[in-house]
Image (tube, grey):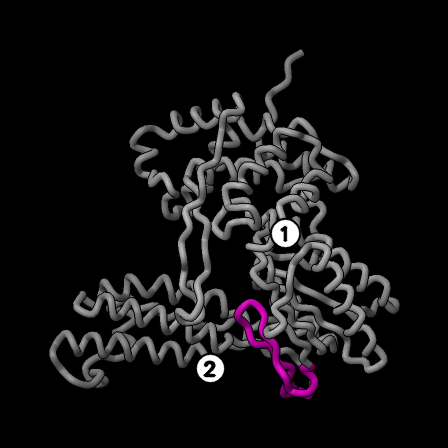
Amino acid sequence: MTTAPITLQDLRRRLYVKAKAEKDWRFWGLYVHVGKLETLRAAYDLAKRNNGAPGIDGVTFVAIEDAGVERFLVELRDALVTRTYRPLRNRRVEIPKDGGKKVRVLGIPAIRDRVVQGALKLILEPIFEADFHDGSYGYRPKRTAQQAVARVAEAIVRNKTRVIDLDLAAYFDSVRHDLLLAKVARRVNDRDILHLLKQMLKASGKRGVPQGGVISPLLSNIYLTEVDAMLERAKVVTRNGEHTYVEYARYADDLVILVHNDRRQDWLVEAVTRRLREELAQLDVRLNEEKSRVVDLSRGESCGFLGFDFRRIRSLRGHWRAQYTPTRKARTALRRRLKEVFRQHDSQPVGRVIVEINPILRGWVNYFRIGHASRCFAAIRQWVERKVRRHLMRARNRQGFGWKRWSRAWLHDALGLFGDYRVQYVASAR
């Protein structure tokens, strides 16, 4: 009797079900699935969708498609099957941050290496997804940063107002390869998979995972899973019936822990902080002490998480609720980016400017519209409209902003300037 070949989707589903049912099971025979054309084709489609710059070899998607995608994938498959595949060194790119005061170093793999990383991720992801915890949201299927923000807001409503706000120092650069491989090996009993992963890690240097690698987010979550597990245990051991005294949310290396405001739980803040430091020390991950702090929202203080500034305020009905708005840093970064577009297109038609700024505005607003950003959005909208008006007047060698010449409706309807600044208010738990 012959059986139909298992599809990639079915394989991923079976891997997840098996991993979820048997927490100590170590998977073998995975490497053959990484090298299948179906897996590589799916990985190529994902890489193409994300586009991105070429790696150190300079090969672009256009060049690959001109030569033939199928030929490209067959060559990759043959290299994997014959064990002759060797990843190229990552191309290092420095991205300015904090207004140009600092830089973030991205490691950009070649497209061929992105495809192989994507294939490996497609096979490993369902196994480790079964082990990840509810408080982890970064770069996981069907999980978003907005859900992590909502989790923090819900905890604040539940009177968890003492916030342990932690910043991991150069996290992606500090991941130890030996510890990471050991964590993967707890679930994977496949020498070829581990060797392939080791090659990928070495391409980024002696330590760390590259910010820009396809598989890096998955690996960073694997590395910090035991930190999540410790926080889950803290929730369980301090539970009083249905009431919990600890909550947390993590998005990649951005972690925030919330402790109940009951003064009888003062010890819990110190205990959780101490245990967390112990877990991070075992991983050889350092805290940025200058940015790590404990704040008390019940005293009017605020904390930041994923670009939002959280406070606790009273509603019109007298209930405490969480208020979360875009941080000043996020607003400044948006304005700086838009200013650069206006500067670069100073002599271009306004239509070209709007084509450039609309996607930036749409992405920023869609991210922050879940909170209480109406005032912020109004200020951003007014600022952008003034910049567009000034661009129009400068093109006519005129001063001013043309308030009488052009209405707000004309800017949005005729020119097509982005104008959807609606806020999506989420119902509070009270």
Whether residue 23 appears in this view of the structure is yes
Label 1–label 2 contact, CB within 8 A? no
In front: mark 1 or mark 2? 1
Q: Residues within 10 Å of mark 2 (few under 14, many from 20)?
A: few
> Quick one: SS at disc 1?
helix
Instruction: List x then y, in percent, for residue 145.
Output: 57, 61
The residue furthest right is 241
- In front of the other: 62 or 188: 188
At x 75% / y 73%, what residue is drawn? 259
Q: Report the magenta residues as a range.
A: 296-318
Tag 1: amino acid: Asn
Residue carrying label 2: 375
> Please, is residue 206 above or below residue 334 in the view?
above
At x 58% / y 37%, what residue is drawn? 197
Residue carrying label 1: 221
Instruction: List x then y, in percent, for residue 82.
Output: 52, 21
Q: Residues within 10 Å of mark 1 (few under 14, many from 20)?
A: many
Tag 2: amino acid: Arg
